[in-house]
Image (spheres, coloured by chain):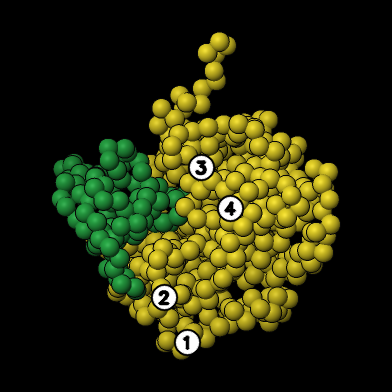
């Protein structure tokens, strides 16, 4: 759903929920994930709705993920690094919420 | 750590203030939470090649200036202010730990926040603010691959639409709550001919690419299951409340949705400065004297963070602040005299432009009636419009009781996203106009911080 206007830069390997993924090194993680076709970054706290980035400038906190074990990291502000472990906090919807 | 002058925000206002001070030989610490100076407006490309339509070279000039004056300007990128206490005393979160600053003079240049308006379905992945889509394109060269509908109001709507469509993005429709500007509004905008011509250029670009422009219209629902599929568009009335009548359904995979800018007042609020509501400058803003001093001694505020005025006003305010502060510090400001006079003249024309711009595209309260009772208002804590109305019916005290009772504004974003919508909800319910309501509160720390960071800031005990 997103495409890149210029040529891809050097790719590095990260893991997203344990799966290896190649992303452009140095690009803000939120942009890189959107380009990789991932638009849902977490489920909301009460309604368990799918949510993804909104403002991409550090204000809204809708793009947060667990990065290298640290929770609530704004992925729009973190450049992609080789070996980054990304947990997208998208648990299955509990049955009573579905 | 002591530093005579600390400037928070390295956007056009803050960076220009630091440069003006440096030219009179005055050192400053320039804190900014972004990787590069320039603010959102002058965000550089990260190695990309294709310049977007209307690319501005002034950001590169600012960054070169900061590098040139590196012996006087201590620019710390990635450093985020998380608290302000009387003194003023600042707590700063940096990549390698937190620290405290106690400047003699504190200049706050914290920039703008986009205004969002909750509508049914706006929490679906695939809905971004207009500024968010622009940042993806501008700094990462990432653009939507499918059909795009852009909605909201103001200059950013047309700028982003023109930039994306020129980059080959399938922007099919632009939905603007404002109508076509009136002759009087155009005359006001003509006080700054370059800006008016820029706007006309965007309009012509959209027409040339066959983009449909729906004026006096709004997106009243975003539809999809886990991702955006289409939007529903309705005409709006004078106060921008949706009118009954036919709805238009537009297919889209990506939606841009935001309604102009407001001042980011977090730091001026924490510093204890007086504020007032000024719709022409984006709503709540800090009160200032002619030299941009706030009601708190030795705390100054400039740029969009002190009231939306746009990039040219921000640059001019930076120059004027630098000039004034140089004099206050007892240094000679001769090198800046002529520049400050010219900046003052620019601000006069820009103020007239701003008034016309507000008259045309300033947010009107009816737009907030699009939310139905199940629409999420506070995205961080999942608080719906219905939850807020129910709490207001219970008579919770404002604004604290409502915040504690519903958790709206208590999530990770600290109310930056839902603030205006919650206030409009209160105004609608109570019949008290927003300017008469208490301002939304701000609490430290402004960003999530680790316990280790807070511990490193704890005051040292005697003998330690």
* Residues tagged by mark 4 and mark 2 found on one chain of the structure: yes
Q: Which residue is mark 2?
A: B50
Give the vertical position of B295 relative to B54 (above or below): above
State the yellow chain: B
Q: Chain of mark 3?
A: B
Mark 3–mark 2 Cα distance, whole angstroms, equals: 30 Å
Specify few, some or many for label 4: CA neighbours under 10 Å numbering under 14, 14-19, or 20 or more: many
Secondary structure beneath label 2: loop
Instruction: Give whichever of B180, B110 is nearer the camera.
Output: B110
Residue drawn at 31 percent across, 53 percent down: A80
Callout 4–callout 2 Cβ contact below 8 Å: no
Q: Which residue is mark 4?
A: B10
Q: Which residue is mark 3?
A: B80
Mark 3–mark 4 Cα distance, whole angstroms, equals: 11 Å
Callout 1–callout 3 Cβ contact below 8 Å: no
Mark 4–mark 2 Cα distance, whole angstroms, equals: 25 Å
């Amino acid at each position: 759903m997103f495409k890149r206007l210029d040529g891809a830069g050097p790719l590095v390997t990260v893991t997203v929920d344990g799966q290896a993924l190649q992303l452009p090194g140095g690009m803000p993680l939120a942009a890189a994930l959107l380009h990789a076709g991932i638009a849902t970054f977490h489920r909301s706290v009460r309604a368990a709705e799918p949510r993804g980035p909104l403002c991409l400038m550090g204000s809204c906190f809708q793009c947060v993920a667990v990065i290298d074990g640290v929770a609530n990291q704004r992925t729009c502000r973190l450049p992609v690094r080789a070996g980054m472990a990304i947990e997208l906090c998208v648990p299955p919807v509990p049955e009573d919420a579905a | 750590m002591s530093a005579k002058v600390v400037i928070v925000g390295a956007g056009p206002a803050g960076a220009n203030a630091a440069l003006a001070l440096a030219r009179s030989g005055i050192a400053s610490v320039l804190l900014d939470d972004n990787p590069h100076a320039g603010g959102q407006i002058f965000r550089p490309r990260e190695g990309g090649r294709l310049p977007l339509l209307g690319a501005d070279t002034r950001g590169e000039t600012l960054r070169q200036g900061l590098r040139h004056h590196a012996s006087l300007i201590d620019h710390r990128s990635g450093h985020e202010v998380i608290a302000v206490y009387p003194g003023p005393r600042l707590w700063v979160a940096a990549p390698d730990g937190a620290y405290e600053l106690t400047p003699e003079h504190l200049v706050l240049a914290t920039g703008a926040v986009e205004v969002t308006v909750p509508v049914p379905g706006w929490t679906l992945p695939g809905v971004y603010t207009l500024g968010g889509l622009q940042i993806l394109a501008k700094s990462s060269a990432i653009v939507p691959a499918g059909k795009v509908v852009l909605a909201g109001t103001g200059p950013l709507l047309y700028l982003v639409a023109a930039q994306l469509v020129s980059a080959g993005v399938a922007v099919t429709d632009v939905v603007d709550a404002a109508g076509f500007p009136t002759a009087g509004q155009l005359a006001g905008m003509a006080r700054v001919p370059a800006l008016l011509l820029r706007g006309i250029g965007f309009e012509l670009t959209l027409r040339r690419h066959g983009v449909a422009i729906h004026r006096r219209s709004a997106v009243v629902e975003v539809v999809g299951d886990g991702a955006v599929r289409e939007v529903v568009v309705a005409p709006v009335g004078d106060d921008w409340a949706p009118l009954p009548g036919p709805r238009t359904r537009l297919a889209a995979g990506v939606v841009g949705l935001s309604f102009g800018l407001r001042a980011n007042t977090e730091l001026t609020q924490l510093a204890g400065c007086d504020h007032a509501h000024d719709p022409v400058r984006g709503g709540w803003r800090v009160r200032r004297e002619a030299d941009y001093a706030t009601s708190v001694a030795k705390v100054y505020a400039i740029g969009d963070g002190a009231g939306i005025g746009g990039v040219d006003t921000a640059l001019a305010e930076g120059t004027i602040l630098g000039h004034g502060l140089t004099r206050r510090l007892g240094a000679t400001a001769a090198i800046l005299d002529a520049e400050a006079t010219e900046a003052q003249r620019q601000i006069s024309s820009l103020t007239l432009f701003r008034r016309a711009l507000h008259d045309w595209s300033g947010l009107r309260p009816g737009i907030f009636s699009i939310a139905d009772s199940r629409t999420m208002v506070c995205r961080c804590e999942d608080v719906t419009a219905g939850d807020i109305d129910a709490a207001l019916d219970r008579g919770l005290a404002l604004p604290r009781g409502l915040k504690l009772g519903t958790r709206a504004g208590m999530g990770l974003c600290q109310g930056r996203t839902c603030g205006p919508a919650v206030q409009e909800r209160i105004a609608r319910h109570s019949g008290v106009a927003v300017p008469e309501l208490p301002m939304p509160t701000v609490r430290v720390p402004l960003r999530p911080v680790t316990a280790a960071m807070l511990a490193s800031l704890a005051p040292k005990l005697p003998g330690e």
